Image: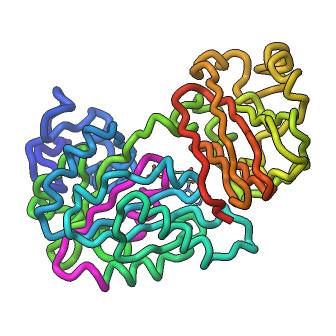
């Protein structure tokens, strides 16, 4: 039998030589039904295309021009790594276009969370970052929570606009877009040239039924997140899957906590008080004396203090120490991007420190919960 010459999706002439040029199809794909070019295949199987990621500069370049367009922007952030996944400077790029902030992974917070407080907290952080939001939606792509509200907000604000979806890697963007696709378009039903103009591999344009588009931008790689720094094998250990079980430690000054072999917290100075760790349940916490902590790490890293395991330990940058002075009566979190946070419960003030791979973003903030 003769094999097809044209892509049955977009009609382009098929070629097997250059995967960078239009019409490319891998040999093996001729056995698939329908026979479509790689680009159409990617659009159809959206999740493959959505795994494209870029650095910040590249992203801002892609996004430049959105400010002059009539667009609705959905910025999706990860509640577990809020400061690490928020695109700072987004406001400058979106101009006067409305922004919906979808705060994903809300399922990770404990069930008894005060959601009004969380919402106010998010609002405050946005204010600090100069981000005006038309709507803040707490959601869980995984549990399918908050999506109805999100879709409602999209309908309310969209008008005749294209919808840009922006976010860092691993925030749950693909999951969210798949949901938008299934609600707004009949992508599964047909693929024709006219419906996919200007599709590029770095920005995926998904046609909606009304002639407008959802524009999925690549996930931004922020190098300060543990989720970007750790070895693939350890990703499951740092990114929690189940709701966080806050681990409370009563500590005296001069005590330390190890988070597996990924980081360390020191209570340097202050009255005996409790600290609540919000980190993945997959990471073992070891308590020790501060004065013994260096030695313990030197002797047990990669084994008792793991992950990372010994064979991949050296792939992480050297640890760097960050010290913080917590004021009186200031309920604070010591936040570590992509690893979680430690809530400081005392009201008398404290001096604390963390040791994390160089480059990891660490900061104090008003406590989230
Ligand atoms: P993308 O890189 O932003 O497109 O994110 P993905 O949709 O691929 O999700 C990244 C990771 O986060 C995956 O391991 C998902 O299982 C997980 N994830 C996505 N949404 C949620 C959520 O609502 N809650 C939790 N706990 N995990 C989520």
- Residue in the picture at 56% in, 51% down: 81
Whether residue 346 is visible to the viewer of this picture, yes or no, is: yes
Estimate the x, y position of residue 348 in percent, counting from the top left: 80, 54
Q: Nearer the viewer, residue 69 or 2?
A: 69
Q: How is the image coloured?
A: rainbow
Q: Which residues are magenta?
A: 156-180
Left or right: 309 with respect to 14?
right
Residue 171 coordinates in the image, percent (x, y) = 49, 53
Q: Residue at x 41, y 67 (%)?
A: 101
Q: What residue lies at 69% left-to-right and 34% top-to-bottom?
A: 354
Q: Is residue 262 left or right of residue 267?
A: left
Image x and y of residue 126, in percent: 43, 63
- Quadrant where the C terminus lies? bottom right
Q: Quadrant of the N terminus?
A: top left
Viewed as shown, does residue 74 lie left or right of 14?
right
* 113 in relation to 295, above or below: below
Magenta segment includes 169: yes
Which residue is at 51% across, 36% downward?
228
- In magenta segment, residue 135: no
Above or below: residue 344 compared with residue 162: above
Q: Position of residue 216 (x, y in %)?
A: 29, 56
- Count of numbered tags: 0
Q: Nearer the viewer, residue 85 or 95?
A: 95
Residue 304 quadrant = top right
Which one is nearer the viewer's eye here, 7 or 252? Answer: 252
| Any part of residue 144 in sight | no
Q: Is residue 219 above or below residue 120?
A: above
């Amino acid at each position: 039998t003769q094999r097809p010459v044209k892509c049955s999706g977009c009609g382009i002439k098929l070629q097997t030589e250059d995967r960078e040029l239009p019409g490319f199809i891998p040999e093996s794909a001729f056995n698939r039904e329908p026979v479509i070019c790689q680009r159409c295949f990617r659009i159809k199987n959206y999740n493959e295309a959505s795994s494209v990621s870029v650095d910040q500069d590249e992203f801002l370049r892609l996004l430049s021009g959105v400010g002059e367009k009539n667009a609705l922007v959905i910025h999706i952030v990860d509640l577990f790594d809020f400061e690490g996944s928020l695109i700072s400077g987004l406001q400058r790029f979106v101009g006067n276009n409305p922004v919906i902030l979808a705060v994903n992974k809300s399922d990770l917070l404990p069930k008894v969370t005060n959601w009004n407080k969380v919402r106010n907290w998010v609002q405050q952080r946005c204010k600090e970052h100069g981000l005006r939001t038309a709507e803040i939606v707490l959601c869980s792509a995984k549990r399918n929570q908050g999506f109805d509200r999100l879709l409602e907000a999209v309908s309310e604000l969209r008008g005749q606009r294209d919808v840009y979806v922006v976010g860092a890697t691993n925030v749950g963007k693909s999951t969210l877009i798949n949901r938008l696709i299934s609600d707004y378009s009949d992508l599964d039903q047909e693929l024709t040239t006219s419906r996919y103009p200007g599709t590029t591999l770095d920005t995926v344009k998904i046609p909606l039924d009304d002639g407008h588009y959802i524009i999925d931008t690549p996930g931004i790689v922020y190098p300060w997140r543990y989720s970007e720094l750790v070895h693939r094998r350890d990703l499951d250990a740092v990114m929690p899957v189940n709701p966080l079980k806050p681990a409370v430690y009563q500590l005296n000054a001069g005590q330390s906590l190890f988070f597996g072999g990924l980081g360390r917290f020191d209570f340097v100075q202050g009255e005996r008080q409790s600290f609540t760790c919000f980190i993945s349940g997959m990471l073992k916490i070891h308590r020790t004396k501060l004065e013994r902590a260096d030695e313990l790490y030197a002797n047990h890293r990669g084994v008792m203090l793991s992950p990372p395991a010994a064979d991949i330990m050296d792939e992480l940058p050297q640890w760097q120490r960050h010290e913080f002075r917590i004021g009186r009566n200031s309920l604070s979190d010591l936040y570590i991007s992509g690893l979680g946070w430690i809530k400081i419960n005392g009201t008398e003030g404290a001096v604390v420190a963390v040791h994390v791979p160089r480059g990891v973003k660490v900061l104090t903030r008003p406590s989230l919960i």
